[in-house]
């Protein structure tokens, strides 16, 4: 079972979409959170410790994650997807982009 944590700023659009999309794959558990103080679900040390792979949407998210949670990232794989904040929740273009970027990393064929 691979545990994937998806992070964006507010945990309203991109990361919750990714959580839903990849939760449908066998052998994968997903969670999502936001890096901003007022995120819907703020990221926690527990979520970071739980995850096998952490996906962030932008470089600034990776920097903020490292700044605030460095001691918990020691053996963690953190991957920046470079997906800008210009999509709506569950928007088909966002789902397609997420699959194009994440599935090869997980070594799963794109549908």
Image: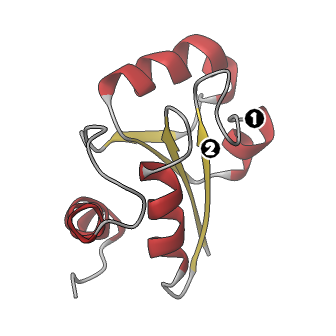
Q: Is residue 32 above or below residue 90?
A: above
State the SS at label 2.
strand
Marker disc for residue 44: 1
Question: Going by the picture, which residue comes out furthest to the top?
Answer: 67
Quadrant including the N terminus = bottom right
Q: Is residue 76 left or right of residue 48?
A: left
State the SS at label 1.
loop
- For the point 47% across and 73% down, which residue is it? 22
Image location of residue 88, percent across then percent down? 35, 55
- For the point 76% across and 33% down, which residue is it? 45
Q: Which residue is mark 2?
A: 33
Q: Is residue 92 above or below residue 16?
A: below
Nearer to me, 102 or 73:
102
Please say if the residues under marks 1 and 2 sit with CB atoms less than 8 Å apart. yes
Image location of residue 89, percent across then percent down? 42, 59
Q: Is residue 108 left or right of residue 65?
A: left
First-in-chain label (1 vs 2): 2
């Amino acid at each position: 079972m691979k545990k994937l944590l998806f992070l964006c700023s507010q945990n309203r659009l991109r990361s919750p979409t990714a959580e839903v999309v990849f939760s449908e794959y066998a052998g994968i558990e997903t969670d999502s959170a936001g890096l901003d103080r007022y995120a819907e679900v703020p990221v926690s040390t527990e979520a970071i410790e739980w995850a096998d792979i952490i996906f962030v949407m932008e470089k600034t998210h990776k920097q903020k994650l490292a700044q605030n949670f460095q001691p918990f990232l020691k053996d963690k794989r953190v991957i920046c997807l470079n997906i800008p904040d210009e999509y709506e929740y569950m928007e088909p273009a966002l789902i397609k982009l997420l699959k194009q970027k994440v599935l090869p990393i997980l070594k799963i064929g794109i549908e």
